[in-house]
């Protein structure tokens, strides 16, 4: 009996060790998250209320940086361009990858080649993609040369120098690069659509289009919402496409500048205004978070309906 009591006493420290063991495994990951995610975020929030510059400073200025945005025409231009980018990019990135996934989901000889070909732009560097499209859309690029050679146009189309065409060209690049990524997501969702429902609908006389809208779309609706949310957040944070296509100018007179480009322009250089740039990044965070919450709320309402 005495040996059992002594054994139980000896096992108590072991229980405490077992309680601590999961945290020891999680500690390296938590340390990385705290160091590279939580700390920069909190530091950005603090800087947004100061007049910190690249050379130092950092006195508390209250909400001055946020009040400054209201009178900053560049801020409103950036917000407008970023919003237009979301409107122009999200619908194609929700619909086109789905159609592409429907085409390549069939198991036919050579389909793996087409899946890989459509996915190739995803793994390509955005810098390489931007340079390729710059070469294609330049006034002396392949597209203009081809159209002029076919005598469809007499003057080169200013894809990269007109403020409207530049924004549309950047949207095309974003859609082209994202097609393969969202196609893979849709392929996974389509694999879970019950074949029995399609077979039953076909027996009842429903055609392919009717089966698509009555069975496929309702089944993968949550995936479509996910794609819409991911592409919208990515569109709000667009930078590389416009930066490369415009040659670091943000379009003629900075007319196509986006919120992230404005943040970079404000924060870089010896006179970089880190306080104002931090306030801009905080606005971007709130906008993307609000967008995600809105999409999730709409999705939940449809699920409850």
Image (cartoon, helix red, strand yellow):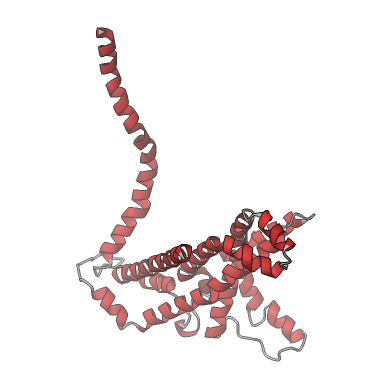
Tell which residue pokes out farthest to the right in this image. Answer: 109
Locate residue 117 relative to residue 63 in the image: left or right.
right
> Image quadrant of residue 297?
bottom left
Who is closer to the viewer here, 53 or 45? 45
Q: Quadrant of the N terminus?
A: top left
Q: Position of residue 95 (x, y in %)?
A: 60, 69
**Image side of residue 275 versus residue 176, left or right:** left
Q: Is residue 249 left or right of residue 72?
A: right
- The image position of residue 206, as x and y in percent, is 71, 67
The image position of residue 123, as x and y in percent, is: 60, 58
User: Residue 209: percent from the left, percent from the top?
Assistant: 69, 70
Image: 14 above or below 183: above
Q: Is residue 189 visible?
A: yes
Q: Quadrant of residue 28?
A: top left
Q: Which residue is painted at 34% across and 29% down in the image?
A: 18
In front here: 184 or 166? 184
42 vs 231, nearest the viewer: 231
Corner quadrant of residue 187: bottom right
Q: How many marks?
A: 0
Q: Going by the picture, which residue comes out furthest to the bottom?
A: 154
Residue drawn 71% across and 89% down?
153
In the image shown, does 170 or 90 lie closer to the viewer?
Answer: 90
The answer to whether one can see residue 125 in this image is no
Instruction: Name the residue rendered at 31%, 66% in the picture.
Output: 54
Taking the spot 67% from the left edge, 81% from the top edge, the residue there is 140
């Amino acid at each position: 009996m005495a040996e059992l009591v002594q054994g139980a006493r000896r096992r108590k420290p072991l229980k405490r060790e077992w309680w601590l063991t999961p945290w020891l495994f999680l500690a390296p990951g938590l340390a990385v998250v705290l160091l590279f995610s939580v700390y920069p975020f909190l530091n950005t929030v603090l800087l947004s209320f100061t007049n910190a510059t690249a050379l130092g400073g950092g006195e508390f200025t209250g909400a001055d940086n946020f009040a400054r945005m209201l009178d900053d025409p560049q801020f409103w231009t950036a917000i407008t361009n970023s919003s237009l980018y979301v409107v122009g990019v999200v619908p194609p990135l929700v619909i086109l990858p789905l159609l592409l996934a429907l085409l390549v989901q069939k198991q036919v000889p050579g389909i793996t080649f087409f899946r890989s070909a459509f996915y190739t732009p995803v793994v390509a560097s955005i810098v390489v993609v931007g340079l390729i499209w710059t070469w294609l859309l330049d006034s002396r690029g392949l597209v203009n040369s081809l159209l002029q050679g076919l005598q469809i146009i007499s003057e080169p189309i200013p894809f990269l120098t007109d403020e409207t065409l530049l924004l549309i060209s950047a949207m095309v690049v974003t859609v082209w690069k994202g097609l393969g990524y969202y196609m893979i997501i849709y392929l996974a969702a389509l694999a879970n659509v019950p074949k029995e429902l399609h077979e039953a609908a076909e027996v009842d006389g429903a055609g392919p289009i009717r089966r698509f809208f009555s069975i496929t779309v309702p089944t993968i609706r949550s995936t479509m919402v996910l794609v819409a949310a991911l592409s919208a957040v990515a569109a709000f944070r667009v930078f590389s496409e416009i930066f490369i296509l415009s040659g670091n100018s943000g379009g003629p007179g900075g007319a196509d500048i986006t919120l992230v480009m404005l943040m970079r322009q404000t924060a870089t250089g010896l006179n970089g205004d880190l306080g104002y740039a931090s306030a801009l990044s905080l606005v971007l965070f709130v906008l993307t978070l609000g967008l995600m919450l809105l999409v999730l709320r709409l999705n939940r309402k449809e699920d409850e309906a």
